[in-house]
Amino acid sequence: MNDNPIVVENLVKYYEGRCVLDGVSFVVPRGCIFGLLGRNGSGKTTIIRILLGLEPPTRGRTQVLGQDSTRLSAQTHGRVGYVAEGHHLIQSYKVRRLISLCQGLSLRWNEEFFGHLMETFRLPLDRKVKELSTGMRAQLNLALAMAIDPELLVLDDPTLGLDTIARRQFLELAIDVIQRQGRTILFSSHILSDVERIADRIGVLVAGKLVVDCTLDELKSRIKKLRVIFPEAAPPDLYLTEIVNQRQQGREMVLTVANWNPQKQAILETFRPESCTEMPMSLEDIFIECTRPATAAVTEDVARASCP
Amino acid sequence: MLTLMRREAYDNIVYLVGLGLVAAMLIVVLISAAFEGMQEDYFLPLGLLTFLLLLGLYALGAAQMYGDRANRISSLLTTQAVTRSRVLAARALVGLLAVLAVLLPVVVTAVVLLWAFLPPLDFYRRLLVEIPLTLALTAFACHSAGLLVGWTTNRIRLLAGAVLLVTAVASLLWIKGFGPDVMAVLLLFIAATLLRTWHTFTSTSL
């Protein structure tokens, strides 16, 4: 058994001369739910496609379950469940036939679990895939990916197009899968509350670079958003290292600072603020702060310096 | 592999049925020709039907690859316990089986007719081996060419490939006839096209 089902080393990808991935490196340990975040076009899908051997890298190395992604064997493919963005299923097939095809091509097929999923999703077997709604296609794709009892589950924006109830069902299923010992999930999504709910490690991609790679708790503990009220106008010369974002309005200043520590607090106190309160930050807030173009470089340095 | 082959055959059933019909017509013309003393009138329909057969096999190969690219079938298949090489091997094997399934009844008919109507000379016995083998290789060469050209989204390229490649392969028979020389050329052609298709298919984005 491999300790790191996913290894990405210095991955570079160019599309028609445009750099899509710029030296991305990370590992996903066994049993981890890794949430890959990033804005549209930041390179999330490209990383996933390279990992699964659907796309050749320009440079760098990726490994899935201990095998190089460019030379994945059928056995390794059979241990990976994949839900693609847009759910590329064979549109002209009836659902029953698609299921039969995937079952025929699988190494393992958990009929009981698959039956349970089909019952939960209530998918019509006699309809063609192209006649299904986006949500139903997502559910079918998810059921097919999970039926093989995957050691590694790769989900590329899987909840796209699902309604609230289906999304909730999906998340519960994902949690169910991770609870089966040794399962690993790589999960990319735009819906940050979903990622926050299930991921235990986060990677944030900005313009092809991985600017954050650490556990969710670490990320939350490292980045602080502070509302500082000064007796008079906020000082224009306030300087702290690793400020991710800074806004001021009259006496109030809102600071987002990475790696908040007693030294930084001492420096802030020299400006004699009237009050300093910490504002709660959701993953979405952190994501927005981290993906602002001007702050990406600061966040990258910070994240890399302190993440294990 | 059997699942992949079944899928290929099922998805391209129209081409397989079409090829079967052409083979049936070929058998009918052969029988008619034999009973009427193999007159020159039959050469044209026999030639045209053979060309149609080759065109059909090219179309089968092209449809296998074109349908895949247009519907992103391999991007689903290769996320199952399957490699790209296996997907391509299944396609080539289905083509080979189609060639055998179509040509075998024609060959058996021809053998029976030759045995019944022609004197038992060595010359004819040699023909019985060389003609079917060369024809089978030509047919498989056309299917391989279809696989190579079919990995495109450009329909004009597909049609141009059909006309040029099938005509080129068929004219090889027209000019050189049936025999070991042509078989060697066809084997090289098949190896080269399959290798090139494999290289393109395994290194491209799905």
Image (tube, coloured by chain):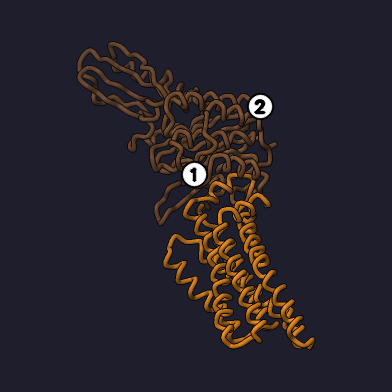
Chain colours: A brown, B orange
Q: Chain of mark 1?
A: A
Q: Chain of mark 2?
A: A
Name the residue at 30% across, 26% down. A246
Vertical position of residue A89 compared to residue B145: above or below:
above
In-image side of B23 versus A295 (left or right) = right
How much space separates mark 1 and mark 2, taking CA atoms? Answer: 29 Å
Question: Relative to the observer, which residue lies in front, B78 or B55?
Answer: B55
Q: Provide the residue designation for mark 2.
A: A181
Label 1 secondary element? loop
Q: Of the residues shown, which amino acid type is indicated by label 2? A: Gln
Vertical position of residue A89 compared to residue B140: above or below:
above
In-image side of B156 versus B105 (left or right) = left
Percent x, y of residue A47: 50, 44
Say whether residue A269 is visible.
yes
In-image side of A43 versus B74 (left or right) = left
Within-10-Å neighbours for mark 2: few <14, some 14–19, many 20+: few
Percent x, y of residue A28: 57, 35
Name the residue at 67% across, 63% down. B97
Percent x, y of residue A37: 44, 34
Percent x, y of residue A76: 65, 44
Name the residue at 65% across, 73% down. B137
Say whether residue A304 is visible.
no
Q: Quadrant of the C terminus of chain A?
A: top right
Are both tags, 1 and 2, on one chain?
Answer: yes
Q: Of the residues shown, which amino acid type is indicated by label 1? A: His
Q: Provide the residue designation for mark 1.
A: A88
Question: Relative to the observer, which residue lies in front, B142 or B198?
Answer: B142
Label 2 secondary element? loop
State which tag comes first along the sequence, 1 or 2: 1
Q: Toward which corner of the image does residue A86 lie, by quadrant?
A: top left
